[in-house]
Amino acid sequence: MSAFRHADVLIAADVIYDITVIDSLVLVVKSFLEQDPRAKQTIFAITKRNMASFELFLNKIREHGINCSWLTKNCASLPKVFECTFTQDRFDVQVARFTSNLLCPHQQIVV
């Protein structure tokens, strides 16, 4: 738990697919951001496989007063860091930054 408190950035990828854990995921993000709203942020790489879970996650983020800004809405053009045999088009992968609503309460989520 100490690492959680001392980290400035929480990074997650491919975690928004199971609607049964969305509430818990959002509470972890909220808890992390509330520790130090000016210094903490989360970065999520989100694959839009299931629109129901994607929309539920964004609604829950909004309900908890967490700001969302899209760093990229399409990762297809980003260079690959590692070569691999599995390839994914990445057109459905988006990268978002979540920050505390205490900093910018007027910012809205844009999908």
Image (tube, rainbow, N blue to C red):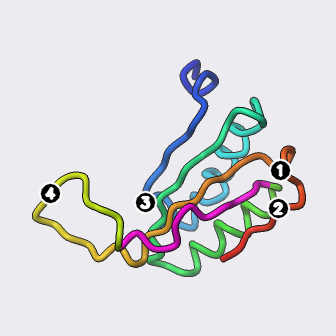
Q: In the rendered view, would you say 109 is above or below 97? A: below
Give the residue at the far top of this rendering. Answer: 2
Residue type at numbered disc 4: Glu
Q: Which mark is residue 101?
A: 1
In depth, the one of 22 and 77 nearer the eye is: 77
Residue placed under numbered mark 4 in the picture: 83
Residue type at numbered disc 1: Asn
Q: Which of the two discs, 3 and 1, sits closer to the camera?
A: 1
Q: Residue 4 placed where, x, y %?
A: 58, 27
Q: Which residues are magenta?
A: 66-76
Q: What whole-number distance in Å separates the C-alpha atoms at marks 3 and 2? A: 25 Å
Residue placed under numbered mark 3 in the picture: 14
44 within the magenta span: no
Q: Residue at x 35, y 71 (%)?
A: 77
Q: Residues within 10 Å of mark 3 (few under 14, many from 20)?
A: few
Q: What whole-number distance in Å separates the C-alpha atoms at marks 3 and 1? A: 24 Å
Kind of element beneath mark 1:
loop
Q: Quadrant of the N terminus?
A: top right
